[in-house]
Amino acid sequence: MKKIIGLVFLIVAVMLTTLFASGSLKISDITKVFSKKYDLPIYSTKYIPNRVAEEDFKFAIKTAKSSDKRILMEIGGDWCPWCNALDAFFIDNSDLKSLMHDNYVVVKIYRGKENYNSNFLAQFPKILGTPHFFVLKPDGSLLHSQGTEVLEKGRSYDKLKLQTFLKRWIKK
């Protein structure tokens, strides 16, 4: 039975790898399915250059206050390999993605050549790279600024480190 289950997982992994490589399936397709489960707003699932960061942040504050959650702001862009690796990591580790969305209002803010969001980001500590996390109180005040390089492992992320980070900043 274990061999059959292992074989099924191997077949699924090969199929997904083939679909990703051919471009027939994108990470955003899987994200859409997960987003429906949580009924997440678009600003929680995608980096969009032309979105108004200030408006998304205001809405995140409103949502955080009403749900009594902290805000996890993720700065990055679809152009960023480490941002894509982080998205893929959360897809592969749905328990951590659930931990994140169960306990935080997530808002993704685009930062890249199409829109640096400099005016919006000027209110926060300077960031040196992407992705970057800001943990904020429900009122939008900063609790913590965290580069993700310390959460990396090889070409991806370290599950225990990310889990520890998320659990550390959950509102108690």
Image: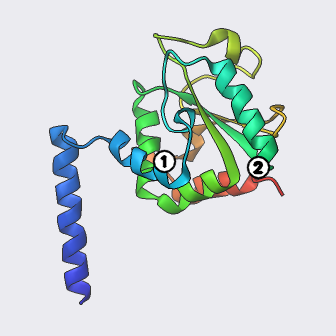
Residue 109 visible in image: yes
Quadrant containing the N terminus is bottom left
Callout 2: 10 Å neighbours few (<14), some, many (20+)? few
* Residue 27 location (% of width, % of height): 34, 42
Q: Residue at x 21, y 84 (%)?
A: 3
Which quarter of the figure has residue 57?
A: top right
Horizontal arrangement in the rendering, residue 69 relative to residue 10 (left or right): right
* Residue 106 location (% of width, % of height): 63, 40
Callout 1: 10 Å neighbours few (<14), some, many (20+)? some
Tell me whether the residue at label 2 lies in contact with that at label 1, contact meaning CB atoms closer than 8 angstroms: no
Secondary structure beneath disc 2?
Answer: helix
Q: Residue at x 50, y 38 (%)?
A: 45
22 in relation to 97, above or below? above
Q: Nearer the viewer, residue 21 or 69?
A: 69
Q: Nearer the viewer, residue 73 or 55?
A: 55
Horizontal arrangement in the rendering, residue 79 relative to residue 112 (left or right): left
Q: Amino acid at mark 1?
A: Ser
91 in relation to 84, above or below? below
Instruction: Look at mark 2 in the image and give the residue it sits on.
Output: 67
Say which label, 2 or 1, has the lower sequence index: 1
Instruction: Look at mark 1 in the image and give the residue it sits on.
Output: 35
Residue 154 visible in image: no
Q: Residue at x 76, y 45 (%)?
A: 70
Q: Amino acid at mark 2?
A: Ser
